[in-house]
Amino acid sequence: MKVGTMLQDIVSSLFHRPVTEQYPFEKRPAPPRTRGMLHWNPEKCTGCCLCNSDCPANAIELITIDKKAKQFVMRYHPDHCTFCGQCVESCRFGCIEMSSEEWELAATTKEPFTVTYGRDEDIEALLAKRAAGDAEPADES
């Protein structure tokens, strides 16, 4: 590199403001089509398991507690997810969506990387079955 070019860069940077953003302290809004955290609405779900079978990263587990009563629990693993949106496209009932606001998913421990969605009573029923000694519910897809 020539000395003249280097001095020119130094002088120009003295008079221009840096373009670096102070990220954690100054946040910009996310673009509207950003694919972030997955959200699931258990009220609309019919248990077809297309989201589960079409997920290329196996980041979704749909656990059926009682299909007739439409009791399902979804376990989502953001650390496995590639945020491709295939589950959203595959869901015929519109019960899965990806948040454009929740995209900062870093953590120092592994606990936040298993998210359980469902009605509180369905989650409690699943935990009760596990505590009773069942490894998994018989109808898991």
Image (tube, helix red, strand yellow):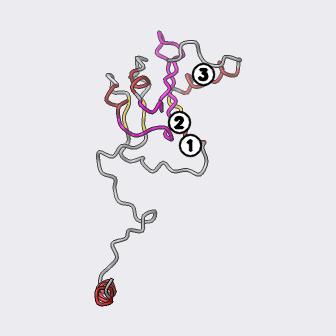
Quadrant of the image containing the N terminus: bottom left
Which residue is disc 3 drawn over?
126
Q: Position of residue 66 (x, y in %)?
A: 52, 13
The quadrant in which residue 15 appears is bottom left
Q: Nearer the viewer, residue 53 or 64?
A: 53
Give the distance between the C-alpha atoms of the residues marked 2 and 3, in whole angstroms: 14 Å
Q: Position of residue 52 (x, y in %)?
A: 44, 24
- Label 2 vs 3, first from the N-terminus: 2
Which residue is disc 2 drawn over?
115
Crowding around mark 3 (Cα neighbors within 10 Å: few <14, some 14 to 19, many 20+) is many
Q: Position of residue 46 (x, y in %)?
A: 40, 17
Q: Nearer the viewer, residue 93 or 36?
A: 36
Q: Does 114 appear above or below 1?
A: above
Residue 82 highlighted magenta (yes or no): yes
Element under disc 3: helix
Give the distance between the C-alpha atoms of the residues marked 2 and 1, in whole angstroms: 7 Å
| Highlighted range, magenta | 56-85
Q: Nearer the viewer, mark 3 or mark 1?
A: 1
Which residue is disc 1 drawn over?
112
Q: Does 110 appear above or below 22?
A: above
Give the distance between the C-alpha atoms of the residues marked 3 and 1, in whole angstroms: 19 Å
Q: Amino acid at mark 1?
A: Pro
Residue at (55% x, 36% y) in the render: 114
